Every structure is written in C-alpha cells, then in structure tokens.
Amino acid sequence: MSAKVIVKDLNFSYNHQRVLSSINLTVEANSILGIMGPAKSGKTTLLRVFNRLCDLIPNIHIEGEVFLDEENILRPDIDVDKLRKRVGMVFDKPVPLPRSIFENLAFGPKLHGIKDKNRLEELVEKSLRLAILWDEVKDRLHESALKLSGGQQQRLCIARTLAMESEVILLDEPTYGLDPVSTLKIEEALQSLKRNYTIVLVSNNTWQVARTSDNVAFLLMGELVEYGSTHGVFTVPKDKRTDDYISGRFG
C-alpha cells in the first residue's frame, strides 16, 4: 500500500512538558491505523496534530514533520482550513448541530460553496449510506438530529465528516459510552469506509483495535513503543510493555 500520512521525528510539548517524543510512523492509504495506550500517552494529541487542531492549544511547541500526500502539513504557511476539510475529526462524544439531520450534513458543504440542491442531496444520501445510517433516517431527514440515539448521533457525525469529502478520518474514541449494538454498527461502517478513506482510530479498547485495525501503534507516556501490523503486534509483540498492556497487566 502507498503511504497517506508519514510522521517523521515528531516532538510535541505543552507548557514545556513533553507530550510526544520522536514519533515516527506511516499511515497507509485505505487502511485503519489503531492507536492504543493508557491515559495521558499522547494518543489524542497525535490525532490533533494530523489536522492542526493542536494549533488551538496555547503554549505548544512542535518539532518534526508530518506529510499528507508528500506535503508537510506543519509548515507555517499551510492553509489550515483546506487541511481540516481533507482531514476530518470525529470526537468521542457526538455533538450534532441543533438543526435537522439534513442540515447537519449540508451545513459544511454549503460553507465551502456548494449551493446546488441536487448536489447537496446527493452528498447527504451518500454520506449517510456510507455511515450505515441512511435506512434508519431516510424518512426523517428534516427532523432534529438531537432526537437520534447516541449511536445514531455518532454515525451522523461520521457522515458529517464524509459530506465534507475528507480523505482522512480521525476518530477519537468513537464508540465511547455506546451500547454493543451501536458499537458494532460503527465498526462495520469503518470496514466499508476504508475502501475509499484512510482512517486513524484512537481507542482505549484493545479488543476494538484488534478487531478493526490493519496496523497498530502503541503509545506509552508519549513514546511510540511499538508499531506494526495488528496481527503481528497482538500475536508476537516485540516489546514486553506491549505484551503487558495487551494482556491487561497495566493500563
């Protein structure tokens, strides 16, 4: 597979405290990279670097390079708005807009200049189908998105990112607090989505990482302890700390 994102010698500090240290890894195109590790290991920070949401944090210092299709996105002159359109983020708790289901998905494309009604309808339907939500909401598109269940709201947020025609989808604990049925639907959606998108999934559930990802990165206290194929890391980990974390001896 070709590389979609390449991280080279990434260091990230906040208030002079090192959060990420010398991170080197590759995110392959049309795959799912699972990032796992205990709390305060830098998992979410790494996600935020990928679409420059880290810029919103005061008193940060970044060193190294992050390439998206061979373009260093950490350059100071990068167009951050365009970057965030290409690299979308879905947070752990769904936050639908207090609008209709349709408007939740059409809002972003409208902001970026898409006004044609037919085009917007196509985008909305396509995105909802990809997020495995269309059949559940197709007859209520003009009802408030706030009426959806938690699992449906999270899939709506994924669909909202897809409606922006992002290339990379960043997921920060997307099934946090959801029931097993909703979790399964999101995991099924991810397997379909990777055919056309590159996905980076942060999860505290090691078994979810094992089930869904193609490659896995294990972070511990800001250090990349191990990176490789999910099968390899989970069956024959190279570092004892990885084995201890997977088997529940710490974390």
Image (tube, rainbow, N blue to C red):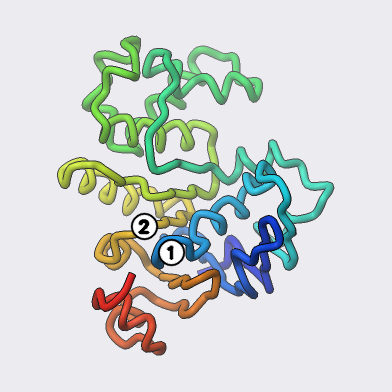
204 or 110: nearer the viewer: 204
Vertical position of residue 210 compared to residue 247: above or below: above
Name the residue furthest right.
77
Residue 206: x %, y % from top left: 29, 66
Q: Secondary structure at mark 2?
A: loop
Q: Where is the C terminus found, in terms of image quarters?
A: bottom left
Q: Residues within 10 Å of mark 2 (few under 14, many from 20)?
A: many
127 or 179: nearer the viewer: 179
> Of label 1 and label 2, which has the lower sequence position?
1
Image point 34% across, 13% down: which residue?
144
Q: Which amino acid lies under the numbered mark 1 shown in the image of this protein?
A: Ile
Give the quadrant of residue 92: top left
Q: Which residue is labeled 1 in the image? A: 35
Residue 123: x %, y % from top left: 46, 27
Image point 59% across, 14% down: which residue?
115
Vertical position of residue 1 compared to residue 160: above or below: below
Q: Residues within 10 Å of mark 1 (few under 14, many from 20)?
A: many
Q: Return the mark for residue 141.
A: none
Q: Secondary structure at mark 1?
A: strand
Q: Are marks 1 and 2 in contact (CB under 8 Å)?
A: yes
Q: Which residue is labeled 2 in the image? A: 203
Image point 38% across, 13% down: which residue?
100
Give the quadrant of residue 128: top left
Image point 36% across, 30% down: which residue?
156
Residue 191: x %, y % from top left: 32, 54
Residue 110: x %, y % from top left: 59, 19
Q: CA distance from mark 1 to mark 2?
A: 6 Å
